[in-house]
Amino acid sequence: MDLNLTPTELAFRDQLRSWLDANVPADWEKRRAEDEMAARFEFLRDWQKKVFQAGWAGIAWPKEFGGRGASLMEQVIFTEEMARAGAPPLANVLGLMLIGPTIIAFGTDAQKKRFLPSILSADEIWCQGFSEPNAGSDLANVRTEAKLDGDHYIVNGQKVWTSYGWAADWCALLTRSDPNSAKHKGLSYILVDMKSPGVEVRPLRQLTGESEFCELFFRDVRVPAANVLGQVGDGWNVALGTLMHERATLGAGMQVTFKRQFDRLVELSHATKRNGHTAAEDPVMRQKLAQSFIEIEIMRLNQMRAITRINQKGVPGPEGSIQKIFWTELNQRFQQIAAELLGPYVQLTKGSHAIDEGGWAYSFLRARGNTIEAGTSEIQRNIVGHFVLGLPKSY
Amino acid sequence: MQFGLTETQTTLKNTVRKFLGAECPLAEVRKQMETETAFDAPLWHKIAEQGWTGIIFPDEYGGFGMGMVEMAATLEEMGRALLPGPFSSTVLLAGSLLDAAASDSQKQKYLGAISRGEAKGTVALLEDSASWSPDAVQMKASGLTLTGRKMFVPDAAVADFILVAARLDGDLAIFLVPKNARGLRITNLPAMDATRKLYEVTFDNVAAELVAQGSHARKALDRALDIATVGLVAEMTGGMQRLLEITVEYAKTRKQFGRAIGEFQAVQHQCADMLVYTESSRSAAYYAAYAIQEGIPEARLAVSVAKAYASDAYREVGNRAIQVHGGMGFTWENDVHLFYRRAKASEVAYGDANFHRERVARLVVDAPQKQENPQGVLAANARE
């Protein structure tokens, strides 16, 4: 075991850290609470442009496509340092993390040339149209139809839970191009211009009150056949490539975010009264705070082991599901403990009495989504049961 | 960064697994646990021949001079095999305490004998209060004479000597008492885990040899307990691993409603949870071993994180294992309860989850470091 960074990695980290120290907007935390979504998004787009101009956008992408060709460790360091600095997320996160790498892996030269630069610069924002009302956990049940008509596909159908759908210029759409096919076969991955006639975007209001994601409706939308990514009918494999990119390094950033929240909660525990003393002195709260620390720390250690495995094997494996189960459930427990510690104040979502601009109320509610998004805990346990433990397939 | 075993460490781990698979299958464990002391001299001799009784001790005292990660890998396999007897009490408790506390001549004599497999030892720390904090030690030494009672002393009946924590002029001190000392009485405490026997040890004006006193004794005891705790968490991880393997195997073969019960998600998800607990304990155990080995300042915190987590996790893995086995899991004949009993004994040894959570709280709630640079996955360990 050797948990030290190499001199090159340390140099990378220090260079990034000093850039972030000088450039992270100071007012982000406040803006997050106050700004309207559209204004906030423009702020995030400007932030990504800044990051792009400094050469930090898409660091995992090969240099020839405008990236930095960063190693896995450097990607982890990047994610961590962004979280550590409290930096805003990048506006085009789906394009950078998921769709860009998929275009690099499956795209034609023309597709790469057309789409990649504007993903990096945030001039074109991307969303991902995968889930449907009847294709959630059972994603292969996709029904949105793409019917060839000359040199165009005619797309009809509905997508749901589409993050950033309201801001997107383009959509990476999983469609059924062979109507006689079932399940994983006969799907095609198509790049759709969101300004095409027949595309309708309806914001979907979430339990948190925000409209982070949308429903998309496609009615006779004409898409050039040249916009199919990869082979026609091979969409499942193309989409899977995307899912494999997902979250390989995300956990590193989440861990730092949780640790920052934990540190803040400890600060609050010394200022919050409970049963005649501070919450920090309350034996029950102490146990709960310690348990949260322990779980966040173990998430960090699991993450280090996962990164080591990816470094050795080259690809993220089904073990990623273990991390997903662990961090999502830990966050829900942690948010509940934070809520207990803050008492009645946790309810306040804004105003001068709300703690941390209502951030705790938001993260308490938001955490419920963690065990659903990107594969529910039940699906993750199926994956672990079947692909890791070798139990018979249960679905 | 590389969080995993090296090739040499993997080879060692495989060697231990193979050795115990041959020398100490569960049928043998059952045989030994039915004996009075759960100690088997020929097996002990073979373990010593492998050099494992001296695994972490310097070669000048007959040891193997290996690190904490190698120790953890070895102990994981011992836990997986449910190895009965005094290995942990002798090597990790008594051995580490001698290594940290004793004089050179004492080490030559006692630690050398442990390393070579010629002697077994144990540590008598707990008293009626059953507290794992050295602060709770009340037994008084009058000069070099001990009188009083120690509780929950592991493997005392087979130990050639007992290291005793007592107060000398108000200071914590460590004494050594040979097994045949006059006034020493050792009484078995019938307990859940029959693979490791516990004893009440009473001292009636027993003559003892002083090993260490004051802050030196305290530091040595802290270190020995940290090492023993890491070894225990590694063992617990091995136990969880075995329970997982046994349970998955059962879920694949046991049929109900015309199919393997492992095909039912209600069963499959229990197995998935067992894996999450096991892997998380493994991460925590090896990190704590590494932290002690490297002298990382947060090593004590890492030890408490690991023990708090594993204490709950091993029990929970046991709960799931029994449940998945159904009626079979509730029988004496099935092996699951052997691990379940060990899980409970391990949970309360060296401080349970509550004890270690309180220790964590003291380190991260009472004295939070100024949090300008929260630790990342990597940053926490990067030496600059």
Image: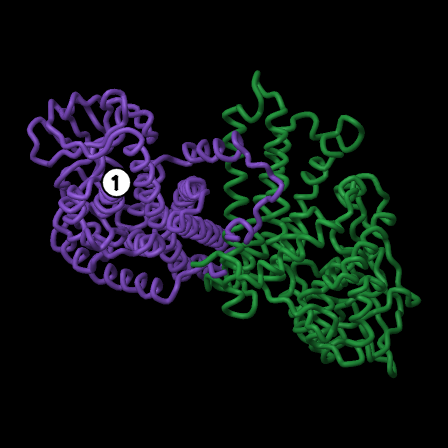
Chain colours: A green, B purple
Q: Quadrant of the C terminus of chain A?
A: bottom right
Using residue A102 as the reference point, say whether residue B150 is left or right of it.
left
Using residue A176 as the reference point, say whether residue B104 is left or right of it.
left
Q: Quadrant of the N terminus of chain A?
A: bottom left
Q: Residue most toward the bottom?
A: A150
The foreground one among B293 and B282 is B293
- Across and down, in percent, residue B121 comes to 18, 42
- Across and down, in percent, residue B10 comes to 35, 64
Chain letter belonging to callout 1: B
The foreground one among A228 and A176 is A228
Using residue B366 as the reference point, say whether residue B28 is left or right of it.
left
Identified at 39% across, 42% down, the residue is: B315
Identified at 38% across, 60% down, the residue is: B249
Q: Provide the secondary structure element on which disc 1 rests.
A: helix
Q: Is residue A392 above or below residue A330?
A: below
- Report which residue position mark 1 lands on: B97
Q: Quadrant of residue A181?
A: bottom right
Assess disc 1: are there few (<14), some (14-19) or many (≥20) residues with their C-alpha within 10 Å of its C-alpha: many
Instruction: Mark yes or no: residue B324 visible.
Output: no
- Across and down, in percent, residue A171 comes to 80, 65
Give the amino acid at mark 1: Leu
